[in-house]
Image (cartoon, grey):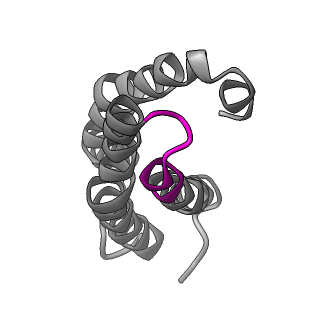
Amino acid sequence: MTRAKREPEHLAFSLRGVKFIDDYIANPCYVLLPLTGITLMWRAGYTFNNAHWAGFALVLWVVLAAVSIGAYSPALRGQIRALEREGPSSVSLQSFERRARIVGPLLGAIALAIVYLMVVKPSL
């Protein structure tokens, strides 16, 4: 995004590329994640009764999905719409960009917490 700001003619391409990845790669993977995780738990002999870390990870997954659907995707769509309507120096583009800049790392932190729980399997 930083490079695209220095070269505004590439900003629309960058945002559409991120939206494509979000819509067609990341989100479908997020849908498959609990299915594969629960299948692997079952195959390894875990249940939600003896693996509380898995239940907590599932709750975090729901939070991740809600924040992604409720905040990140709309911010990304808003950035694209503001850029197309008002140009690269628009105030609304900067507002949507700030939201995405806050929400993106939050989603990354939640995803890392889920990975930690699934790998370390701490006793909770």
Nearer the observer, 35 or 20 = 20
Q: Is residue 70 left or right of residue 116?
A: left
48, above or below 1, in the image: below
Image coordinates of residue 108 in percent, x first then y, are 58, 53
In the image, what residue occupies the spot 53% across and 22% down? Answer: 14
Looking at the image, which residue sits at the far bottom? Answer: 124
Q: Is residue 101 left or right of residue 7?
A: left
**Which portion, as a residue range, is magenta?**
87-95
Image coordinates of residue 95 in percent, x first then y, are 49, 59
82, above or below 16, in the image: below
Observer able to see residue 12: yes
Nearer the observer, 86 or 109 = 86
Observer able to see residue 43: no
In the image, what residue occupies the spot 56% across and 41% down? Answer: 89
In the image, what residue occupies the spot 34% across and 71% down? Answer: 59
Q: Is residue 92 left or right of residue 23?
A: right
The number of callouts visible is 0
Image coordinates of residue 58 in percent, x first then y, are 34, 64
Q: Is residue 16 left or right of residue 27?
A: right
Task: Look at the image and say whether residue 92 sits in the magenta stretch.
Answer: yes
Task: Look at the image and say whether residue 29 sits in the magenta stretch.
Answer: no
Residue 106 lies in quadrant? bottom right
118, above or below 53, in the image: above
Q: Quadrant of the N terminus?
A: top right
46, above or below 85, in the image: below
Residue 67 lies in quadrant? bottom left
In the image, what residue occupies the spot 42% across and 54% down? Answer: 92
Image coordinates of residue 82 in percent, x first then y, are 36, 41
Nearer the observer, 85 or 117 = 85
Nearer the observer, 118 or 92 = 92
